[in-house]
Image (spheres, grey):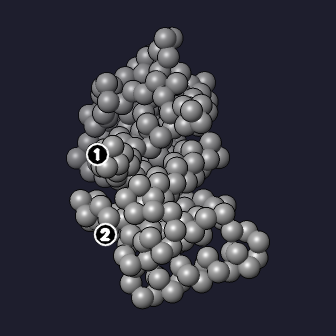
Amino acid sequence: MLQDRIRVLLISTPRGNLTTCRFDEAISEAKEKSIPDDYDFLPVVSGEEIVGSFETKRDYAEASMVSEVYNPLKTEMLIGGDASVIDFVESAHEVPFRFVVSKNGIIGIVTLSDLQQFPTRASLFTLIMDFEMLLSQAIVVASGPHLEDWAKHLDGTQKKASEGFVKRAKKEGRYVNDLLVTSLTAKVQIMGALYPSVRDTLDKLQAPLKGLRDRLAHGDVLDSSLDGLKQISLTVRDILQCRHQLEALMGEA
């Protein structure tokens, strides 16, 4: 329900605030427009109509006009203003620039750089916390809630660390349950043993998931490079795919 309320419209740039380039404009002039704010994409207009997008960072040595190289408007470039932020982020590694639409037509744009905005960060952190809760739930379903139920699936280092976390949490008066104070690394090890079909997915996901979670939790700036932002999108895609797999497996248990 929370994800549904964090909508693309909250992070989009309204149409009236857009920097655009013209269909019949020189590439050099269009690129100059992108420099002050370091835009990777600009909407392309013909008259008052938006007709596509222009990638500002590409090399167009053999072309001189925007009309020769722009990306014409296509369905996959569009996203509804009431779509969730996660709907956008999940596929942003493939479609990093989208026009936001409503019944009145195109009302703004959303891009990979909008992953830095607070509503996106809140949505990402909620997604990750929900996923970690699902891991804990899956462990309880397949094994049990207590350390002694699943400690056999941990290597020596993680078993010792988990025992220490539980002991310290109880001593400091912040204990709720064993899994809540167990590390993500330990949960992934346990899950790999209990649900072998998702072991490879979780092993691949663990490092980027932990890195993203820690940055969000500590209020750190996300990697603003194109590759870094695309990695966030890929991480979200993998979280959602793994979540669907786990929900199906738990339904069979």
Lateral position of residue 65 relative to residue 20, left or right? left
Lateral position of residue 59 relative to residue 125, left or right? left
Q: Residue at x 52, y 50 (%)?
A: 130
Q: Residue reaching furthest right?
A: 173
- Few, some or many residues within 10 Å of mark 2 (<14, 14–19, 20+): some
Q: At which x and y percent is residue 164?
A: 60, 83
Which residue in the structure is indicated by mark 2? 193
Q: Residue at x 37, y 23 (%)?
A: 51
Secondary element type, mark 2: helix
Seen from the viewer's position, the closer of residues 111 and 185 is: 185
Seen from the viewer's position, the closer of residues 17 and 63 is: 17
Q: Residue at x 39, y 27 (%)?
A: 78
Q: Is residue 36 visible?
A: no
Q: At which x and y percent is residue 128?
A: 51, 54
Which mark is first along the chain, 1 or 2?
Answer: 2
Q: At which x and y percent is residue 215?
A: 58, 64
Indicate the quadrant where residue 193 lies.
bottom left
- Few, some or many residues within 10 Å of mark 1 (<14, 14–19, 20+): few
Which residue in the structure is indicated by mark 1? 252
Q: Above or below — where is 20 with respect to 169?
A: above
Q: Residue at x 45, y 87 (%)?
A: 157
Marks 2 and 1 sit apart, C-alpha to C-alpha, by 17 Å
Indicate the quadrant where residue 248 lies.
top left
**Looking at the picture, which amino acid does disc 2 mark?**
Ala
**Count of labels in the image:** 2
Seen from the viewer's position, the closer of residues 159 and 87 is: 159
Seen from the viewer's position, the closer of residues 152 and 107 is: 152
Secondary element type, mark 1: helix
